Image: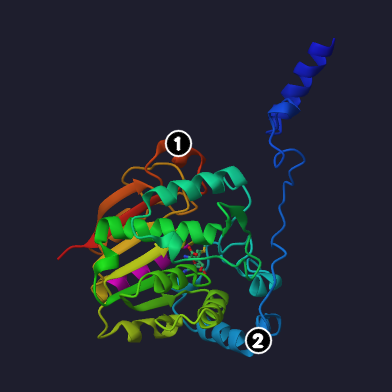
Amino acid sequence: MKKAIKAWLELILKRQGLEIVPRGILYDWQSGAQTTPPRYSQSRLPEGAADYLTQDNPKLLDIQERYKSADPDVTVPAVWSDGYVRSDDIAYFRGDNGWVWQVRGRNTNILSYALTTYYLKSIDHLGLFGKLTEDGYFGNFTFDIDNRLISRDLLDSISEILFLDRHLGIAARADLNLLDIGAGYGRLAHRMTTALPNVRNYFCTDAVAASTFVSDYYLRFRGAERAHVIPLDEIDKTLAGQRVDLALNIHSFSECRLEAIAWWAKLLAKHRVKHLMVVPNDVTETPGQLLTNKDENYLPLLERHGYRLLVSEPKYADPVVQAYGIKPHWYHLLELKA
Ligand SMILES: C[S@@+](CC[C@H](N)C(=O)[O-])C[C@H]1O[C@@H](n2cnc3c(N)ncnc32)[C@H](O)[C@@H]1O
């Protein structure tokens, strides 16, 4: 009888995507786990941040107005529609939200964070763990691992810099100019300009007003003088006469319409940006494809603008880490044909 009830229950639960497992095999962070994690950690905001980082800040309203007049090809949203950024996301922009998801889904538990930390330490040929730190400001989720604060912001940034150095030797290139398309709150701009003194200019741009607004605040807060936030309607003019060696698109094209990706590709080709790093949101291997969240392959579109795929590799070279490390995406590097 007991067996029959269990089998029946299992069948019902399976249909709901649920499973009965013995409590003894669960870790403490798994039992009673919240299905909807909190959006922000209890971290403090720096002085003045709560007053400045509001949805009715005149600077943000002004950027929103300006972006309304920009080319709809690039501004009509696929994911970042009105309401996607909630009012408290503005002050707690480093929380678990659309800019950087941190504590939801698989591979975002403390084991994944620990595995990723020790893995990256084992390949950190630039000594980035000694140069970059975490303070948890602006609602960021942190884990205490190896006697220091660890966040996805820190780990992803280290992983991306190491990838770029392995393939392009970015740490040794004099006067490097970078362009980050869909730069979010300025995560990688802050990390790159802190870790690499040879970065001359790190331009951040975006088609979402809230991203332009918070990144401008964040990079000033971090004192990142070589990072420049360029509003969408000034990016073409800024790039004219400016050599840009490498463009970055990290989890941004996945959240764009194909028209927007084409808009950016045209801009990159026009300004002869030689290399482009792309990190799609997709975590499965899709050889020869770069996918949006709607599974549209935009590689042919980049190819039409002269870019060809040079490198595609898993974020973590060790398959065990790729299976269990945080956010196991794929990294791609493209080059503009001469
Ligand atoms: C998931 S966040 C990633 C942010 C940042 N690249 C990072 O990795 O920390 C996606 C970013 O894409 C930007 N974005 C959305 N639509 C865009 C568009 N049409 N053109 C450029 N960026 C866009 C968002 O504003 C946001 O900054």
The 10 Å Cα crowd at callout 1, few under 14, some 14 to 19, many 20 or more, is few
Residue 79: numbered disc: none
Q: Residue furthest top?
A: 1
Residue 210 appears left or right of 319: right
Of 92 and 83, which appears nearest the observer? 92
| Residue at x 72%, y 57% (from the top left corner) | 38
Give the amino acid type for the residue marked by disc 1 in the picture. Val
The answer to which image quadrant residue 269 occupies is bottom left
Of 92 and 159, which appears nearest the observer? 159
Q: Magenta stretch: dominant SS?
A: helix
Give the amino acid type for the residue marked by disc 2 in the picture. Asn
Say which residue label 2 marks: 57
Q: Which residues are magenta?
A: 256-268
Residue 263 in the magenta stretch? The answer is yes
Q: Earlier in the sequence, mark 2 or mark 1?
A: 2
Q: Residue furthest right?
A: 1
The answer to which image quadrant residue 50 occupies is bottom right
Residue 198 appears left or right of 30: left
Judged from the image, the secondary structure of the residue bearing numbered disc 1 is: helix
Of 120 and 180, which appears nearest the observer? 120
Q: Position of residue 12 (x, y in %)?
A: 75, 26
> Which quadrant is the C terminus positioned in?
bottom left
Say which residue label 1 marks: 320
Residue 229 appears left or right of 237: right
Marks 2 and 1, how far apart at CA? 46 Å
> Which quadrant is the N terminus positioned in?
top right
Q: Position of residue 78 (x, y in %)?
A: 52, 62
Visible residue check, residue 121 = yes
* Figure colour scheme: rainbow
Q: Position of residue 318 (x, y in %)?
A: 39, 39
